[in-house]
Image (tube, rainbow, N blue to C red):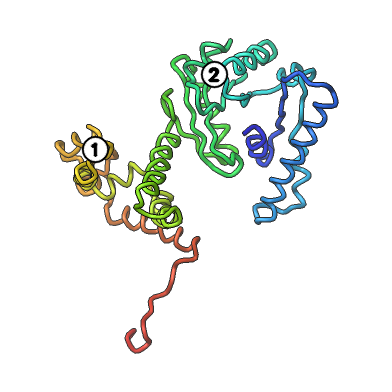
């Protein structure tokens, strides 16, 4: 993940330092640096080959990425504004990384873990500067996927979260804020979906190929253009309510039952766009304009997939 984050910042014009705090011989440290440089260069070459940028810019991007072995780490740490921790997902390894870095960091440096499995509130207990600490969960590949999930803990200073959010927006990322809970947002949603897909293969509902096609051209197509919660309001909370009751009964599985908030919205008449309120407030929204805007997003994706076709109407039928 560290190399992907380095590419994202270097591409946006920032100087980046990849710091290796593991004790190694000089030869091993140099070999690791060479391997990392080659790996990063390969990734950049792929991006340029796919038209993301002019390949003549590749050397300049690479020059933005610097490497520091353990014996150089202290002086490097003293210069940085934001430290992204990306060591293995082992509490003691992370504890040692924070312990090593803390004495050398600037007084206002932000420290962000990139963990995907340890709660930020647990990690906060082992850092020396909890008010400047939060989690920044990137999605692979970090230099492509726009989303970064920011998860502050109870002691994180709001200004620190705001600074990191602004920095990420400045390099073209789309940060979201979520509570310090297991799974953040995307991992919770995708784990349910992936397990359900595997279960459908297991049950013989459809082949892996058909499920993937349905995902790419149906589910993925839809949710690339409209958020999941937004779609509840767009289609109607009542549709989700009744569909959930049907699936829970037909499949004899309470996993499909709707959460209490869906039941509550039904009772309160908060069914989304047509009621003027749901998860979102539509009281000041022109429904026809909004529907046209959503349709435009979907047509843009249809064009991207090269699936938009003209009407198959004979000239005589066109008047």
Q: In this view, does 170 lie above or below 68?
A: below
Residue on which disc 2 sits: 133
Q: Which secondary structure, mark 2?
A: strand
Q: Where is residue 268 in the image (x, y as percent from the top left)?
A: 15, 36
Residue at position x 74%, y 44% in the image: 41
Q: Which of marks 1 and 2 is nearer the N terminus?
A: 2
Residue drawn 55% across the image and 28% down it:
164
Nearest to the observer: residue 35 or residue 297: 35
Q: Where is residue 120 in the image (x, y as percent from the top left)?
A: 49, 20
Which residue in the protein does label 1 denote? 257
Please report the residue visible at 75 percent of the width from the left and 40 percent of the height from the top: 62
Categorize mark 2 by other alpha carbons within 10 Å: few (<14), some (14-19), many (20+): many
| Residue drawn where x is 43% and y is 40% of the image | 190
* Label 1, residues with CA under 10 Å away: few <14, some 14-19, many ≥20: some
Q: Distance between the residues labelled 1 and 2?
A: 37 Å
Q: Which image quarter holds the N terminus?
A: top right
Q: Quadrant of the C terminus?
A: bottom left
């Amino acid at each position: 993940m560290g190399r992907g984050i380095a590419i994202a910042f270097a591409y946006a014009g920032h100087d980046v330092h990849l710091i290796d705090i593991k004790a190694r011989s000089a030869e091993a440290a140099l070999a690791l640096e060479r391997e990392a440089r080659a790996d990063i260069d390969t990734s950049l070459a792929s991006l340029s080959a796919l038209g993301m940028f002019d390949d003549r810019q590749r050397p300049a991007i690479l020059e933005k990425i610097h490497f520091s072995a353990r014996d150089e780490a202290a002086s490097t740490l003293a210069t940085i504004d934001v430290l992204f921790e990306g060591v293995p997902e082992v509490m003691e390894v992370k504890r040692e990384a924070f312990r090593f870095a803390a004495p050398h960091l600037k007084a206002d440096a932000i420290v962000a873990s990139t963990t995907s499995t340890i709660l930020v509130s647990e990690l906060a207990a082992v850092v020396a500067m909890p008010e400047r600490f939060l989690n920044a969960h990137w999605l692979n590949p970090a230099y492509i996927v726009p989303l970064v999930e920011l998860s502050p803990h109870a002691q994180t200073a709001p200004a620190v979260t705001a600074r990191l959010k602004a920095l990420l927006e400045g390099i073209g990322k789309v940060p979201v804020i979520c509570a310090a809970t297991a799974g953040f947002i995307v991992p919770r949603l995708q784990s349910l979906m992936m397990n359900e897909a595997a279960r459908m293969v297991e049950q013989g509902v459809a082949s892996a190929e058909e499920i993937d096609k349905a995902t790419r051209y149906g589910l993925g197509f839809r949710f690339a253009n409209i958020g999941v919660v937004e779609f509840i309001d767009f289609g109607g909370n009542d549709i989700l309510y009744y569909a959930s009751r049907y699936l829970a009964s037909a499949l004899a599985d309470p996993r499909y039952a709707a959460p209490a908030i869906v039941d509550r919205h039904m009772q309160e008449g908060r069914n989304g766009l047509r009621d003027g309120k749901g998860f979102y407030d539509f009281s000041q929204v022109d429904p026809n304009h909004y529907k046209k805007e959503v349709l435009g997003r979907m047509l843009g994706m249809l064009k991207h997939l090269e699936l938009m076709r003209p009407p198959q109407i004979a000239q005589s039928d066109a008047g």
